[in-house]
Image (tube, grey):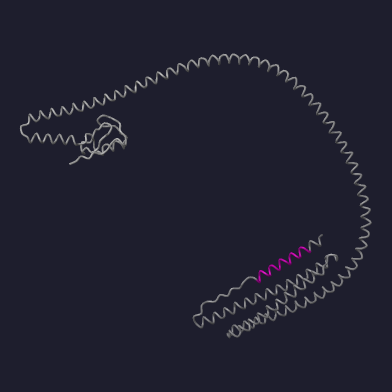
Amino acid sequence: MDENVQVDEKIDVKNVKKEQIKDGQQTPNKITTGPTTTPDQKTVNQKDVIRNWESEALRDLKTQLKKSVNDQKEMKLLLDMYKGVSKDQRDKVQLMAAEKKLRAELEEAKQALKKIQEGKREERKKLADEDALRKIKQLEEHIVQLQKQVATHKQEEEAMLSEMEVTGQAFEDMQEQNSRLIQQLREKDDANFKLMTERIKSNQLHKLAREETDTLKELIKTLTNQVEMTNTVVRKLEEKERILQNSLATVEKECTIRQQAIEMHKRKAIESAQSAADLKLHLDKYHAQMKEAQQVVTEKTSALEAEAYKTKRLQEEIVQLRRKTERMKKIEQAGTLDEVMMEEIREYKETLTCPSCKVKRKDAVLTKCFHVFCWDCLRTRYETRQRKCPKCNATFGANDYHRLYLGS
């Protein structure tokens, strides 16, 4: 179990390192170049471009070196794993897959170096500055060192591959030996299996017998408990029967008393129903008398209103006759016709002006009492809820006052 845990931990380390290398390759390198206006600025920009390109090339080479170092470490880890793990768990397929991966990564590194060399050649043709050439030489030296390191890594990988082939051959030999031993173990396991099956059958029969005895004991206990419970229940039921008999006797007594009370209440109810019927007859009579009295009152009130209306009309006629008599007296007293005419004109103006406001002329009529007023006074009275005639106090509605149009 400890060896399997170590193998899993080493595989996880391998995967984490590969993800880190991929993230380092995926980070894009930005080259910032300013706008070219003068030849000095052009040279400065070219130098910046060279520096950026050199930094990018160095980064790529470093990532490739890291890749190769990580691959070498992974190969060493795999060898340690295969040496530490038992021979039954070794797989030749994993070794071949690791070899393929290493070869593919080496080919990728070679292609990257070729691309870098081609890019350097193109940029050497483009840029002829001394500083750029010096830096390119330094980079070439650095690349040569890196190539030497890659060559050393290749040699180490070839040595590792040769060791892997040797271990593979040894692994095949061990597999043949293991197959022979496995056959022997299978024969022994079959014999042991037969013995174990017989032993298991005997143990099962013994367990079944014990379980049956335990179940029978439990059943006996449960039956005894049930008998005791039924005895206690019977005792409780007997006590309840005694209590119920006593309660029945008391309930029967109460029922007789309540029946007597119900009979008394029935008699009282019959008497009250008879009295209610008599009261209903009296009420009907009183209602009829009230209706007759209301009709008489309504007739009398209508007659009184008519008489009051007639008296008001008579009073108005008396007032008009008095005015006429006064006018006649004034005419007799007056000496000249002009004065008489002026008084008549003043009286006509008074009759034409509104009696409520005494400012505007009469131009509206109440159809209830036929009194004449100005339109504004009647409208303000209707809007302010003072819906009564100013002279006779007769109520009026929205359709009871209309305009008058006096012809010239």
Farthest residue to the left: give it.
335
15 inside magenta stretch? yes
- Residue at the image position 14 percent from the left and 29 percent from the top: 324
Q: In this picture, is 226 found above or below 206?
A: above
- The percent position of residue 266, horizontal first and vertical second, equals 58, 15
Taking 249 as reference, is 375 left or right?
left
Q: Residue at x 23, y 27 (%)?
A: 313
- Could you say which is closer to the camera, residue 1 or residue 319? 319
Q: State the image coordinates of residue 76 (x, y, percent, origin top left).
A: 78, 70
Q: Is residue 230 above or below residue 66?
A: above
Q: Count the marks: how many? A: 0
Range drawn in magenta: 7-25
Residue placed at 88% from the left, 36% from the top?
217
Q: From the image, give the main secondary structure of the stretch colored magenta.
A: helix
Residue 18 found in image quarter:
bottom right
Depth order, front residue of 185/317: 317
Q: Position of residue 249 (x, y in %)?
A: 70, 16
**Left or right position of 155 against 214:** left
Looking at the rendered image, the quarter that the C terminus falls into is top left
Residue 123 colored in magenta in the image: no
As drawn, 136 above or below 202: below
Residue 12 sits in which quadrant?
A: bottom right
Is 198 positioned to the left or the right of 314 in the image?
A: right
Which one is in front, 79 or 357? 357
Quadrant of image for the N terminus: bottom right
Viewer-proximal residue among 314 and 262: 314
Q: Quadrant of residue 407?
A: top left
Percent x, y of residue 87: 85, 66
Q: Residue at x 54, y 14 (%)?
A: 271
